[in-house]
Image: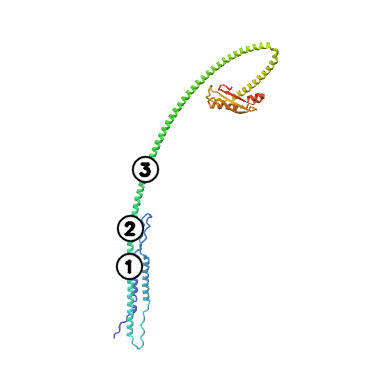
């Protein structure tokens, strides 16, 4: 029996590692060519926010799984390479071993083929997973691109809406500004009109006031002229009354003088008839008359003192006519101090009456009262004063 050619187990030891190395390089190249999707720029705060639910399995997890599978395959290949090829047992000396060696070689070849098949399946599964991951990434990239396009379109639409809204707001603001300017102009025109009307009203009021002042001045002139005429008439009447009074006084003096002469003649006749009997009585009567005359002179002197003091203190109010007259009652204390004043007869003008009372109050006290006898003091503690613009009596 011809001897079979013995196959060295080392002949196929490098095939599987080479295939695995090529597959790993292909996967690395695929990962380097397929770029992960970058994050999109942050949209404006005013753009429409869109969110899309993606798979919970991230690209990093998928790449990690593929990397782990590749590492497992590499470790298997290295273990296969590092596994020592079983050496054939040395044939016992003097015993045939060809059949046992062939059987063992067949078994080893079957094991290598099984391992190669397993490694091939692992490689194909890794390639399939890599292709599936690449497909998913491509689909995800496509989906993200579509979402980005939709978001970009939404942002553009939002931007257009914002621009339109801003344009409308600007137009409304411009219209509002124009309305306000128009209203301001109308207010200014109304204010100017009001000022013109106020100025015209003021001018009319000033003209009316001027007319009234002129009329008042004319009336005052007329009243002053009428007052002057009344005062002249009153003065003339007073002069006539004074002349009449003087005539009457002269006639009265003449009558009194005549009566006195008659009385004296009668007295002389009576005196001649009873001169002796009446001598003592005449002497007593003469003394009493002297005393009475002295008392009357003292009273008249005190009244004249009071009258002069009151005349000096009296301020006749402007416009007081000579026809006015007021009688004031004066009550004095024991020392001549003023106790009270009252109006006995009013002039009809309260200012005139008040000025007369103020004159008495200003002239008081009248200390000359203390110089008079006690009985005369009692008689002079109350008397009346008549006030006329000419004098005080």
Q: Is residue 27 left or right of residue 280?
A: left
Q: Quick one: label 3, few (<14), some, or many (20+) residues within 10 Å?
A: few
For the residues carrying marks 2 and 1, which lies nearer the camera in this image?
A: 2
- Label 3 – label 1 distance at C-alpha: 68 Å
- Label 2 – label 3 distance at C-alpha: 42 Å
Mark 2 or mark 3, which has the lower sequence index? 2
Mark 2 or mark 1, which has the lower sequence index? 1
Q: Provide the residue designation for mark 3.
A: 179
Assign a secondary structure to mark 2. Answer: helix
The one nearer the camera, 204 or 116, is 204
| Residue 270, above or below 314 | above
Tag 2 near tag 1, CB within 8 Å:
no
Which quadrant, please, contains the C terminus?
top right
| Residue 52, above or below 175 | below
- Which mark identifies residue 306? none
Q: Is residue 96 left or right of residue 216?
A: left
Tell me where residue 384 appears, x and y as whole percent.
59, 24
Kindly tell me whether residue 11 is visible in this rendering.
no
Q: Provide the residue designation for mark 2.
A: 150
Tell me where residue 186 appears, x and y as whole percent.
38, 39
For the residues carrying marks 3 and 1, which lies nearer the camera in this image?
A: 3
Q: Quick one: label 1, few (<14), some, or many (20+) residues within 10 Å?
A: few
The one nearer the camera, 277 or 233, is 277
The one nearer the camera, 283 or 215, is 283
Which residue is pictured at 42% across the width and 32% down the height? 201
Q: Quick one: label 2, few (<14), some, or many (20+) residues within 10 Å?
A: few
Assign a secondary structure to mark 3. Answer: helix
Say how many tags the image has.
3
Q: Provide the residue designation for mark 1.
A: 132
Question: From this viewpoint, which residue is outermost toward the left?
Answer: 1
Tell me where residue 388 appears, x and y as whole percent.
56, 22
Which residue is pictured at 61% across the width and 13% down the height? 259
């Amino acid at each position: 029996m011809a001897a079979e050619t013995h196959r060295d187990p080392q002949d196929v030891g490098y095939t599987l590692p080479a295939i695995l190395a090529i597959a790993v390089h292909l996967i690395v190249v695929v990962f380097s060519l397929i770029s992960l999707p970058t994050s999109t720029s942050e949209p404006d705060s005013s753009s429409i926010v869109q969110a899309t639910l993606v798979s919970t399995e991230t690209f990093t997890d998928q790449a990690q799984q593929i990397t782990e599978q590749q590492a497992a395959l590499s470790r298997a290949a290295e273990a296969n390479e590092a596994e020592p090829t079983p050496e054939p047992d040395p044939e016992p000396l003097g015993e045939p071993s060809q059949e046992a060696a062939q059987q063992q070689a067949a078994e080893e070849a079957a094991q290598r083929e099984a391992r190669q098949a397993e490694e091939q399946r692992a490689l194909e599964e890794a390639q399939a997973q890599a292709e599936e991951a690449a497909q998913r990434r491509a689909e995800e990239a496509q989906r993200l691109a579509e979402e980005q396009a939709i978001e970009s379109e939404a942002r553009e639409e939002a931007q257009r809406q914002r621009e339109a809204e801003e344009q409308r707001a600007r137009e409304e603001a411009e219209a509002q500004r124009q309305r306000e300017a128009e209203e301001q102009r109308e207010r200014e025109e109304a204010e100017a009109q009001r000022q013109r009307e106020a100025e015209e009203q003021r001018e009319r009021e000033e003209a009316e006031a001027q007319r009234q002042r002129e009329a008042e001045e004319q009336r005052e002139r007329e009243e002053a002229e009428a007052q002057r005429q009344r005062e002249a008439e009153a003065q003339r009447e007073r002069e006539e009354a004074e002349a009449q009074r003087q005539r009457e006084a002269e006639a009265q003096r003449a009558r009194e003088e005549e009566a006195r002469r008659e009385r004296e003649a009668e007295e002389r006749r009576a005196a001649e008839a009873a001169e002796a009997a009446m001598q003592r009585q005449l002497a007593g009567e003469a003394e009493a008359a002297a005393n009475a005359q002295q008392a009357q002179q003292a009273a008249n002197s005190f009244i004249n003192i009071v009258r002069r003091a009151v005349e000096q203190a009296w301020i006749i109010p402007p416009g007081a006519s000579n026809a006015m007259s007021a009688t004031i009652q004066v009550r004095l204390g024991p020392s001549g101090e003023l106790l009270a004043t009252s109006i006995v007869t009013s002039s009809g003008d309260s200012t005139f009456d008040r000025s007369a009372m103020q004159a008495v109050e200003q002239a008081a006290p009248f200390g000359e009262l203390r110089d008079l006898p006690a009985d005369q003091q009692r008689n002079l503690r109350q008397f009346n004063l008549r006030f006329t613009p000419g004098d005080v009596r």
